[in-house]
Every structure is written in structure tokens, then in C-alpha cells.
Amino acid sequence: MSKPWPVGEVVELKEAVLGRRSVRKYKSRPVPKEVLEEILDLAVWAPSGMNRQNWYFVVVTGGLRDRVVEICYRGYLSYIGERVERVFSHKPRVVRETRSFFATLGGAPVVLFAYAEPGPESIFTDVQNVSAVIQNFLLLAHERGLGTCWMTGPLNMEEEFNELLGVRDKKLVAIVTVGYPDEMPRIPPRRGKKVDYRGFQEDGES
Ligand SMILES: Cc1cc2nc3c(=O)[nH]c(=O)nc-3n(C[C@H](O)[C@H](O)[C@H](O)COP(=O)(O)O)c2cc1C
């Protein structure tokens, strides 16, 4: 079997974890379908509760992607914008950039819709199953030189997206913008460690 991954493009897992950023400005260069297929084929090797693998993805580009952007912006104007402007009233640059991102999705040529197929487990399990694939997807896309932005801001437009895509009986968990980056995003600071280690011996033996 031939290698599924082009030699030379592999990055260290640690580099991928640290180097991945939310990208909000993309080149118009299209993303080949085969690249997206390779990434998704690997991303779905995520764990899932009861191994249900109850995810469903729709990947859009072209004219359909333009209609997705229109819906996102309408969502911004009718709902999220007001919240963003309130929360970031002291940061006009954040308000400007958020509005512009929702109006264009940063020119991302591809948008991934990540759905859960509801089942007997709780919605929390369903969302975690899909989220595990999304995080794999972000890291693998980064490895391939692609930028992404995981977005839940547009979820209030779920019904309109479902109508556009002809999706029924599924829960939209997130959308993800995908494309070749046209910016080097600043690195948002991380808060201090929120971990308590209990029961470990001081010498680290246990
Ligand atoms: C569940 C989730 C929802 C998010 N929703 C949005 C969103 O709606 N719009 C957006 O611009 N970024 C969104 N983000 C991206 C975060 O803002 C970003 O991950 C965070 O600021 C840290 O930056 P980094 O990804 O570059 O490390 C979301 C991230 C997650 C995990």
C-alpha cells in the first residue's frame, strides 16, 4: 500500500498542537478535494462514545460557499453582532474584525459543516464525539499547510444552513472555515494551568 501522506509534509504533533492558529484571512487558492478527503479520512479515527461515530460532515465550496457566507452575515446582523458589540464595547478593533470575518468568512474557499446524528446518548456525548473529529481535522489541516477556524458563532442560523444543504434530523455542532492562510495570526495568550495533580509523590514516581 502506498503511503497515504506525502513525505516531507509531516510535522511533529507538538508543533501541530502549538502552531495551529485560528485563521481568519485566506488566500483564494482552491483546496483540492483530494486533500480534504485525505484529512477527513484520518480525522474520523477519533474516539467516540460506544464507538458510535455518529458524525456527519458536509464540505462546501464555490457558489454554495458564497451562500453560506451570506447566511453567516445575516446571522451576525440579526443576533451575534449585538452581543459582540456589547461584550467588546471597549475594543472597537475586535468588533470591526469580527463583523468583517462574519461578512466574508475571511475569503475561505471551503466551509466544513460538522453535524451530530442524535441517538440514545446525551447531546453532550454527541457533541464530544464530533468535537474530537474537529480537533483532529484542525491539526491535520495545519499539517497540510491549511488554515482553519472552528466557529460556533453562526449556529443560530442552523435552520437556514440545513435548508440550503438539504440536511435533516441532525444537530449542527460547528462550522469550520478552511483555506490557505493569508495571515500570520497573533498568538492569543493562554491562561495559567488549571490542573490539580492529586496523589502524586513529590519525586514524581507515582
Ligand atoms: C467551540 C469553539 C467555538 C469557536 N467559535 C468561534 C467563532 O464563532 N468565531 C471565531 O472567530 N472564532 C471562534 N473560535 C476560535 C477561538 O476564538 C480561538 O480558538 C481562540 O481565540 C484561541 O485562538 P487559537 O485558535 O488561534 O489558538 C471558536 C473556537 C472553539 C473551540
Image (tube, rainbow, N blue to C red):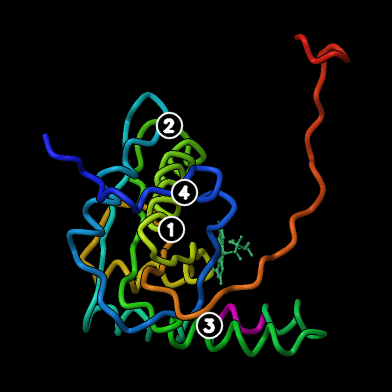
First in sequence, mark 2 or 3: give its number. 3
Secondary structure category for the residue under label 1: helix
Cβ at disc 1 under 8 Å from ligand 1 = no
User: Which of labels 3 and 1 is toward the front?
Assistant: 1
* Res 53 quadrant in image: top left
Span shown in magenta: 79-83
For disc 3, the marked residue is 76
**Is 172 in front, or is 2?**
2
For disc 2, the marked residue is 121
| 10 Å crowding of disc 1: few (<14), some (14-19), many (20+) | many
* Res 206 quadrant in image: top right
Secondary structure category for the residue under label 2: loop
**Is 10 in front, or is 99?**
10
Secondary structure category for the residue under label 3: helix
First in sequence, mark 3 or 4: give its number. 3
Q: Amino acid at mark 4?
A: Gln
Q: Quadrant of the N terminus?
A: top left
Horizontally, residue 197 falls left or right of residue 129, namely right
The alpha-carbon separation of the residues under discs 3 and 1 comes to: 27 Å
First in sequence, mark 1 or 4: give its number. 4
